[in-house]
Amino acid sequence: MTTQLTIGPVLFNWSAERWRDFYFKIADEAPVDSVYLGEVVCSKRLPFYAEYIPEVAERLAAADKEVVFSSLALVMNNRELAGVSELADQTDSLVEANDLSAISYLSGKPHIVGPYISTYNEGTAGFFVEQGAKRIVLPPEIAAATIAELAKIGVELEIQVFGRLPLAISARCYHARSRNLHKDNCQFVCGEDLDGMELSTVDGKEFLAVNGTQTLSHSYGNLAPELSTLLELGVSHYRLSPHAIDMVAVAQCFRDQLDGRLDAGEATARLSELALGVPFADGFFHGQAGVDWTPAEV
Amino acid sequence: MNKSLTAKKLELVCPAGTPASLRAAVDAGADTVYLGFRDETNARNFPGLNFSRRELADGVAYAHDHNAKVLVAINTFPKAGDPEAWHQAVRDAEACGADAVILADIGLLAYTVEHHPKLRRHLSVQASASNKEAIRFYAREFDVKRVVLPRVLTVEEIAALNDNIPVETEVFVFGGLCVMAEGRCSLSSYVTGQSPNMNGVCSPASHVRYEEVGDQLVSKLGEFTINSFGEDEAAGYPTLCKGRFSVEGSVSYLFEDPTSLNAITMLDALMKAGVTALKIEGRQRGRAYVTQVVSAFRQAVDAASRGEAMPDLDMSLLTEGGQDTTGAYQKTWR
């Protein structure tokens, strides 16, 4: 299995033009093999950029990138379910299932199990493979020992190696709540924070990032120092989760490391500059608190 | 068919953290008791709590003698490469005569279907099945008979669901309130390395500290301050999502206030929405608490089934900080 670099779906409420231009730039300049797009967090956001999806997909395909459509993580009503069903009905594209409804619709045809599905062991992974999963994107809360077990199944495994870690999803919108608004009348205030709204403790320690109904880590997950271990474990796909920073340079950094042109220490130093001072975390991989940062090779 | 005309009496499903609580719940009028084994196979893996195999067998006998049922929650996600404790739990639940198991993991559901096909299966809230297609999937693939709904849906959405699924639904009506979709939350694990999904704990006491800073009492989980209390405030437990945090200079309970779910005023609506069973959270609670809450809900369910007005029940001493909420059942919560 060759090693593939992927760009995960944009999780934040970027303007339609920013969203389109981000993917255009990835198509034109980023040394990645696979690109995921679609609305994972809040179904209310999709109409804003939906019209750009076909041309973005076309441009990515023309650049020889695999295009994957990601489904919504928390599906609560028939309107949202219809969207998942429509996505699953596409015959010519791969879909990343982020809710069991998508798994159900995609059963029997090749698909990707997304990181919002609780795949924690070989029993569950094996079931998904029998249903047609060709790739499983691991949830964030996963340790090296678990990856080793899942790799025995022989399915493609993808792990997020860069970007804020998705930690929770809710029916409640915390962006709206922070402005004393309800979700139904949210005024799309989440669009003000390109990388999520910073949440800190009362004594001023940076902690989490709020993205509408989603809660992410403040720290960027960074597994660049663990790449050689991940390769040995048999992980085939390496996900970079989009932020409003130079993602082409981030992708180049990982590409250079995978191709042996950059060692782990140099890569992390470069990523640190690109991340504009946001700290890194790798604790889940080491079976510790997720926020911990105890890199192996730096 | 108009469900309000055919609504059956709601089944009251009550928590038991110990054999004494099981007997208390049954004596107070529980139709069903749910519990877990004393290990990491269930989502209330707290010290001093839960059941040995012998205690389960005795508990089942006591419950069955009093026309009550026993459900065994095996609702954490088995450890990769080492699922034996979870498989053993399923085997022992069946051997002890449990009326059903409550499962979340797909691999464990598949195992149970294959090896214990006659053991009735309920889907845990930790599986986060929040829509009709996800529920149909679990019914089709694993023949689950009942789904415990995640605490994300409004009553209207629950009613719409029940018209379109082939299984029973059970909903939480009282106790601790997850504000995140259950089974999909790694907040506790991010801070402590211990999570509901993997370890059966959330914001575990082993990682909690209280410190005095000036005239404030500060509660910490791992290395993060979750709340800070002045002298005139009662200090609560630092459950991560009930903490006070700062956003853009403004301090608030951004995720949720320190509050408990209490849907006792909504039983009629839930009954009309086609719900089969009502679940009370709190296996970590003591026997006295179980007696009080179960007794109150017994009266309320009986009144609702007779179409009578809700009895006037003061639950404020049983809720966190004396506060309660109907949570996601009302759309404005979102």
Image: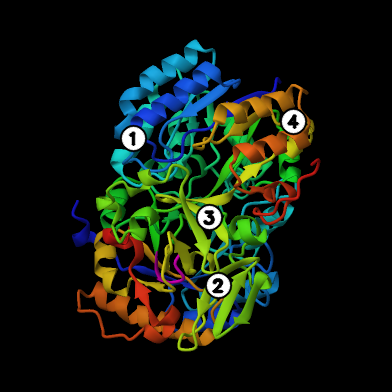
Respond whether the residues carrying marks 1 and 4 are from the same subunit. yes
Residue A56 can be seen, yes or no: yes
Q: Chain of mark 4?
A: A
Q: Which residue is mark 1?
A: A46
Reading the image, the residue beneath label 2 is: B238
Residue that label 4 marks: A234
* Residue drawn 46% across the image and 85% down it: B233
The answer to whether dots 2 and 4 both sit on one chain is no
Q: Is residue A204 left or right of residue A184?
A: right
Which residue is at 68% across, 35% downward? A270
Between the residue at mark 1 and the residue at mark 2, the CA separation in whole angstroms equals 36 Å
Disc 4 or 3, which lies upstream in sequence? Answer: 3
Asked which colour scheme the image uses, the reply is: rainbow
Within the magenta stretch, is there residue B176? yes
Q: Is residue B113 left or right of residue A153?
A: left
Q: CA distance from mark 1 to mark 4?
A: 35 Å
Which class describes the residues within 10 Å of circle 3: few (<14), some (14-19), or many (20+)? many
Q: Is residue A156 visible?
A: no
Q: Position of residue A58 (x, y in %)?
A: 42, 15
Do the residues at pointers 1 and 2 share their chain?
Answer: no
